[in-house]
């Protein structure tokens, strides 16, 4: 067990190191001067000077006409938790764990908590997930998951043997000081304080504990006040739609996790690209010889500019600036992925969101066991199409199962291009692929009664198969 864990840790370190070296190489190829150290704005009150502290504590001064802050995020650490990096971890420090524990307790109900729960369970640890919500599905729906996708994920957690302590929080930590092999004891209480119900557990024993309860912008040591930048209560940098911060000199921009939610690599990259475009807009125009009305010359044959196929009001218009004020709440800005096993992903609206917008929405559902590839290799899971009943336009795609985070990108294109259920039905999909589920879901949208019967039959067959009944 120790050798397996050491191999995993070694591989992770090697991959991270390779990625870091590759990033440095890309900077060098692009002609970017790379300086390693801890940066902070000077106390002079300007926003064009940075002090760079090297690992040997030497300090250098760096001046720049424009500065982009992209220092990422760190795990949020609630008060009262005795983080020590040995037995009590956050979602980053857990990477320093040197052995595979026999038992793990995790506080959190979001994506990171679920991912770590499945990782340790798949490696053979006993896992207890402590969540404040009484209904685990509701906790996942709060972060945007469709109700059926959330229910499928919770069912998988239970089926895999992960214990869920619902409506609970840790009241007190008992960590043995002189015996590293003795278990940690976590005293539990009800959500918000007070005793739990008589039938609920009052404590949990574990080898290690992980708090996976969100992240916060990594800005505490940047001396933002020195540049006249006032962060919000979480340390996030407030910017305008051009991703420009309110600094003394007006020359500071920010992108990625330092802006707050949604704390995703994909959106951080997009914001970084948009920030650079805004920082050097004049230079880019001169370099490309582009005029302001260039877009008018880029019309397609049908007379449209094709710049934004998705036009459901203004909600889906992220624009080139990736305004953080709307990005976190915009279901059309980017696809969401949960890298657990099974994977989960979605793009666009859920049925509930459609109803809140006054859209009469329907659903078409396909089970993984209804397509041949799913039946043979990965029968547990589903794909759902949410559509406007009046027009047939697909408003959202929700998936839980193998390769969900890959499959969602085709669904994203269906939504952005305003494709309809009829469009999906007239497409031809290669046999023995997961993409066949898109057509099965579209058929279910056209014939919901027959689809329910087919899903029921597929479900019964799957139960018999799992029981080893070949009749």
Image (cartoon, rainbow, N blue to C red):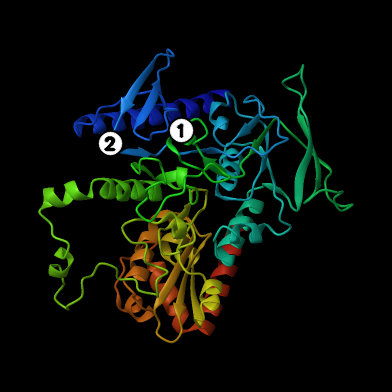
Q: Nearer the viewer, residue 148 or 396?
A: 396
Report how many numbered discs are placed on residues in the image.
2
Q: Dividing the picture into quarters, in which one does residue 38 lie?
A: top left
At 46% from the left edge and 49% from the top edge, which residue is drawn?
238
At 76% from the left edge and 53% from the top edge, which residue is drawn?
167
Q: Is residue 167 left or right of residue 302?
A: right
Q: Which mark is residue 290?
A: none
Instruction: Give the farthest residue toward the bottom.
Output: 390
Q: Is residue 274 left or right of residue 471?
A: left
Percent across and percent down for residue 49 are: 35, 29
Which image quadrant: the N terminus? top right
At 45% from the left edge and 60% from the top edge, which residue is drawn?
326
**For residue 92, above or below residue 356:** above
Element marked by disc 2:
loop
Q: Which mark is residue 65?
A: 2
Q: Nearer the viewer, residue 266 or 400?
A: 266
- Residue beneath disc 1: 226
Q: Check if mark 2's residue and mark 1's residue have beta carbons within 8 Å.
A: no
């Amino acid at each position: 067990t120790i050798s397996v864990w050491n191999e995993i840790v070694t591989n992770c370190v090697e991959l991270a190191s390779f990625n870091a070296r590759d990033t440095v190489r890309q900077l060098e190829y692009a002609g970017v001067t790379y300086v390693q150290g801890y940066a902070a704005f000077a106390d002079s009150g300007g926003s064009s000077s940075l002090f760079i502290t090297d690992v040997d504590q030497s300090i250098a001064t760096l001046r720049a006409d424009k500065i982009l802050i992209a220092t990422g995020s760190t795990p949020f650490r609630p008060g009262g938790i005795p983080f020590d990096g040995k037995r009590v971890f956050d979602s980053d420090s857990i990477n320093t764990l040197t052995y595979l524990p026999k038992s793990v307790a995790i506080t959190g109900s979001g994506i990171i908590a679920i991912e770590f729960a499945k990782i340790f369970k798949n490696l053979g640890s006993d896992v207890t997930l402590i969540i404040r919500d009484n209904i685990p599905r509701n906790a996942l729906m709060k972060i945007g998951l469709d109700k059926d996708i959330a229910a499928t994920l919770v069912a998988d957690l239970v089926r895999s043997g992960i214990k869920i302590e619902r409506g609970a929080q840790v009241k007190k930590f008992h960590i043995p000081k002189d015996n590293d092999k003795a278990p940690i004891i976590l005293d539990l209480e009800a959500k918000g304080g007070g005793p739990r119900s008589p039938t609920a557990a009052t404590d949990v024993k574990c080898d290690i504990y992980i708090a996976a309860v969100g992240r916060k912008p990594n800005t505490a040591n940047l001396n933002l006040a020195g540049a006249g930048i006032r962060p919000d209560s979480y340390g996030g940098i407030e910017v305008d739609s051009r991703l420009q911060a309110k600094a003394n000199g007006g020359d500071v921009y920010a992108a990625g996790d330092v802006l707050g939610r949604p704390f995703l690599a994909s959106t951080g990259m997009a914001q970084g690209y948009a920030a650079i475009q805004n920082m050097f807009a004049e230079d880019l125009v001169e370099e490309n010889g582009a005029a302001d009305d260039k877009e008018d010359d880029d019309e397609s044959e049908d007379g449209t500019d094709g710049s934004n196929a998705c036009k459901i009001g203004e909600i889906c218009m992220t624009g080139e600036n990736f305004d953080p004020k709307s990005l976190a709440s915009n279901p059309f800005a980017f696809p969401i992925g949960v890298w657990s096993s099974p994977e989960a992903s979605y793009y666009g609206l859920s049925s509930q969101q459609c109803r809140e917008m006054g859209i009469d929405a329907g659903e078409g559902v396909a089970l993984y066991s209804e397509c041949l590839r799913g039946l043979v290799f990965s029968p547990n899971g589903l794909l759902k199409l949410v559509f406007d009943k009046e027009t047939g336009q697909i408003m959202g795609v929700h998936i839980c199962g193998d390769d969900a985070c890959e499959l969602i990108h085709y669904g994203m294109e269906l939504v952005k291009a305003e494709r309809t259920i009829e469009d999906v039905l007239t497409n031809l999909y290669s046999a023995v692929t997961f993409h066949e589920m898109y057509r099965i879901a579209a058929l279910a949208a056209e014939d919901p009664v027959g689809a329910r019967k087919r899903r029921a039959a597929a479900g019964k067959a799957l139960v018999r198969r799992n029981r080893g009944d070949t009749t």
